[in-house]
Amino acid sequence: MKGFRTFLLRGNVVELAVGIVIGAAFTALVNGFVKAFLTPIVGLVSGATGDFSARTFHASGVTFPYGIFIDATISFVIVAAVIYFLVVMPMNRMQEKFFPKATGAPMRECPECLTAIPAAAKRCSACTAPIAPTTVVPQGGPADK
């Protein structure tokens, strides 16, 4: 029981639960917006009486409610755009600012298989061929002075 309590109180589980609850509330908000504003506008443009979600077509006695699908598509596009512009883009900018990409170790090609390997490597990680290491001069070393 103690392990289960520890699992539940871990930060990731709580953050995930909060994210799911907020996501569900946001989805309800977007669905309400689509049904109250966008569906009537699309319905008016398409010739419906303002309720586009009720649009259907019939084939061989089967009813296809395509208006419901279009409502769901509009909701998805809105949710995806909001998440991208208000969550993903700011998060990427913040990560670039606080965690700049590290310049990788100097690379060279393996003379046997031409795979990119670190310049200081003594053996190729792809073909395992032994290779004479090259001397790597760190930045700010004798070559820079």
Image (spheres, rainbow, N blue to C red):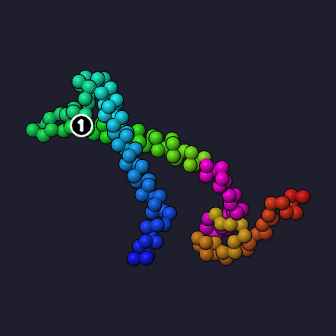
In percent of width and height, residue 101 lies at 66, 55
**Is residue 8 a member of the stretch shown in magenta?**
no
The majority secondary structure of the magenta stretch comes to: loop
Residue 119 in view in this figure:
yes
Q: Quadrant of residue 66?
A: top left
Left or right of 8? Residue 50 is: left
Please check the rendered image and state whether residue 102 is part of the magenta-colored stretch, yes or no.
Answer: yes
Give the number of callouts: 1
Q: What x and y, as percent, mark residue 103?
A: 69, 57
Which of these two is toward me, 37 or 100? 37
Residue 100 locus on image (x, y percent): 67, 54
Looking at the picture, how far across and down is residue 126, in whole percent?
58, 70
Q: Is residue 48 above or below residue 60?
A: above
Q: Residues within 10 Å of mark 1 (few under 14, many from 20)?
A: some
Report helix, strand or loop for mark 1.
helix
Report the span colored magenta: 94-115
Task: Kindly identify the residue that appears in the image at 41 percent across and 73 percent down.
Answer: 4
Mark 1: amino acid: Tyr
Q: Which residue is mark 1?
A: 66
12 vs 143, nearest the viewer: 12
